[in-house]
Each structure stands twice: as C-alpha cells, then as structure tokens.
Image: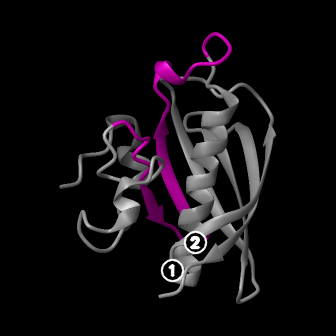
Amino acid sequence: MTLPLPEPFHASFAGLEEQILSGGSDNSFHQCFGCGPSHPTGLHVRTFRTDEGVASPILISRQYEGPPGAAHGGIVAAYLDEVLAATVLRFAGRLGVTGELTIRYMKPVPTETPIVGRGSLVADHGRYVDVEGRLENLSTGVVLATGRGRFFPLPA
C-alpha cells in the first residue's frame, strides 16, 4: 500500500509515474534504510519518473537535525544517494549499488520543509553508471545540495 503524498507536493508530482520496487516484501531491498517500504525506521524515499530522470518528494524529520533547524549532513547524503540510485533504476532498468558518492553542501537543508530531489543520467558505461542530482527547496527552487555518483547495476 502506497501512502498519499503530503499536500505540498500534490501540484509538482501530479501526473508523474511512481517508480516502485518490484517484488513483494521478500525482496531484500524492501528492508533498505533509504528506499525500503518495509524498513520500520527508514527514510522511505519515493521517486517518480520525469523526462529528465527522477524526482523525489522529501520532508526531512526534525529527528535528523544536525545544526539547529537543518538536517545532519549524513542524512542529506543518504537522501541524495537514494535519489541517485533511483536514477540508475530509471535508466539502466536495474537496481544498483553505490561505488562512489560525492556531495556538495550549498546551503543548510531545512528540516520539516518540502524539498525535491532530482536525478539525471550522466553516462551509462555498461558495467557502471554515472549519475548526478540535487536537493532543492520546493517553494523557492534554491539548490541546497548536489551529488554525483558512480553506481554498479546488479545482475537482472
């Protein structure tokens, strides 16, 4: 069962197709801390297909606060890692694992504020895929953090 999107995301995500993990709860990725719908305390990152790649509605809970009012950098990296991994699934058609991840923190990422994660393909080299993405404030479009990663698609 998929939960409805929080209200602030309705307009931005209307008409986009959600990218769902295949298989049932026996799929080991269903327990993934970042994207797993079955993980009891995970981030439950959801992604939607766009023409450019993927978009992800993100609301970072205050429990992940680092500096006052802002998300801890490790959580920001975790969200970007998930957005980038979803981009690999979108373009390679297979789940992938992170080989390299580089994050650039541009501005503090606020907690309890609607954020959009975006990911796009840089290059598919066959054995590995290079992707890039960003987190931006939903209401202002200001880029808060960017990421670039190299992922290794898993065998089908």
Q: Position of residue 60 (x, y in %)?
A: 50, 30
Residue 37's place in the image compared with 65, above or below, is below
- Residue placed at 51% from the left, 73% from the top? 95
Asked where in the image residue 47 lies, by quadrant, the reply is bottom left
Disc 1 marks a residue whose amino acid type is: Arg
Residue 9's place in the image compared with 70, above or below, is below
Marks 2 and 1, Cα distance to the nearest angstrom?
6 Å
Magenta run includes residue 7 = no
Name the mark on residue 96: 2
The one of 48 and 22 positioned closer to us in this rendering: 22
Disc 2 marks a residue whose amino acid type is: Gly
- Residue placed at 32% from the left, 52% from the top? 37
Q: Position of residue 25 (x, y in %)?
A: 24, 63
Magenta residues, start to end? 41-69
Name the mark on residue 94: 1
Name the mark on residue 5: none
Residue 30's place in the image compared with 108, above or below, is below
Q: Pointer 2: residues within 10 angstroms few (<14), some, or many (20+)?
A: many
The reply to whether the C-beta atoms of the residues labelled 2 and 1 are less than 8 Å apart is yes
Res 20 visible: no
Q: Secondary structure at mark 2?
A: strand
Asked where in the image residue 110 lies, by quadrant, the reply is top right
Q: Secondary structure at mark 1?
A: loop
- Residue placed at 40% from the left, 42% from the top? 9
